Image (cartoon, rainbow, N blue to C red):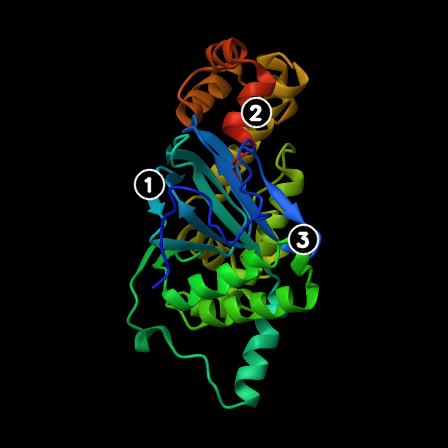
Amino acid sequence: MVSRGYATPPSCCPASGYYPHCTGPVTHTICDFLTLYRTETITDPVLVVYEPRIYIVVQGEKVLYLHDRPILYDESQYLISTLDLPVSGQITRASAAAPHLAVCISFSPSEINEIIRESQTTHTNIPSPHSLHNTVTTAYPAMGLSNITDNILHALLRLVNLLDPDKNSHFLAQLYKKELLYYFLHGQQGHVLRDIAQSHSDLSRINRALNYLRHHFHEHFEMNTLVTIAGMGQSTFYKRFSELTGMTPVQYRTKLRLQEARRLMVHEGTKAAHAGFLVGYDSPSQFSRDYKHIFGRPPHADLQHIRTIGIEAYKRQHEDVWF
């Protein structure tokens, strides 16, 4: 049995990125698909975009809000996100004695496809979700939680152990990643991973629309533009968009606008009203209301709170620890 919560960093990970004084993300050249995070403090609510990734809390706890619906998870579960999803998140359990430790594994649709093809070639078919017994908690189809298993933990520990400078093996890192993806495909969210690997699935079509939103959220355009980009019927598009993301396209765009506006204010010194205008708001009062709803304070009060901490210190403590 592998331990599922460490009071101290795992002894098998001397160079894993869980450094005593590190509070932000650490990546490594031998496996650029792996990012490790560590923080000793809980955080304020932060608006981040969860990209298609697999997220594992090694120790600690966090809560995400996918359009007001809370998703709470800790070291007993892993989270799969298969779309670019703007979420409000907060690390809720972390201390100097038991820091919050987390792992992020990136993947591509082509990697998922390769594993599916090889499984079919060797007659090791990926099972249907109905044949599996581990539990899953799905807020929306594009983001869900499953209980972590021992085989996942063993493979993850072998992967992290490669970060030891004496075990610099890019080849083995790729094999361990492939093993992990195989286990995730055999998990109860495997059907969602298969969907993202299929270019004509609804999930992939919606993802194309989201990519456009990510690059044009500050512009004024007809939302039906997204329907054309997705290549779907209008009613089907809006229905599937809501089912997959838990929000409408307008609500999705609002989250992106608020995230960018906060970045402009905090890190570039942009005045609140001007930041709202730059990201597409016509009404300062509407901008202030939306901002308070997400971040808990109106723009000016939020800035004052951050400045009392110090912008760089706030960034290290509350922003750099997020994926």
Q: Is residue 148 above or below residue 264?
A: below
Q: Earlier in the sequence, mark 2 or mark 1?
A: 1
Query: Three-letter amino acid code at disc 3?
Result: Pro
Residue 273 appears in view: yes
Q: Earlier in the sequence, mark 2 or mark 3?
A: 3
Q: Is residue 141 left or right of residue 260?
A: left
- Of marks 2 and 1, the one in the foreground: 2
Mark 2 lies on residue: 315
Question: Which residue occupies the foreground of this view, 294 or 122?
Answer: 122
For residue 162, side relative to residue 242 (left or right): right
The percent coordinates of residue 320 (x first, y second) are 56, 32
* Rendered position, 62 above or below 46: below
Say few, some or many: other residues with alpha carbon within 10 Å of mark 3 (under 14 / 14 to 19 / 20 or more): few
Residue at image mark 1: 70
Give the distance between the C-alpha atoms of the residues marked 2 and 3, in whole angstroms. Answer: 29 Å
The residue located at (33%, 43%) in the rendering is 72
Q: Secondary structure at mark 1?
A: strand
- Residue 259 percent across, percent down from the top left: 55, 30
- Disc 2 crowd rating (10 Å Cα; few below 14, some 14-19, many 20+) is some
Determine which quarter of the picture holds residue 68.
Answer: top left
**In the image shown, does 289 or 189 lie closer to the viewer?**
189
Where is 260 relative to 246, above or below? above
Q: Quadrant of the N terminus?
A: bottom left
Measure the C-alpha gap from mark 3 to mark 1.
39 Å
Please state which of residues 171 and 222 is positioned toward the viewer in this rendering: 171
Which amino acid lies under the numbered mark 1 shown in the image of this protein? Pro
Q: Nearer the viewer, mark 2 or mark 3?
A: 3
Give the foreground label among 3 and 1. 3
Identify residue for label 3: 165
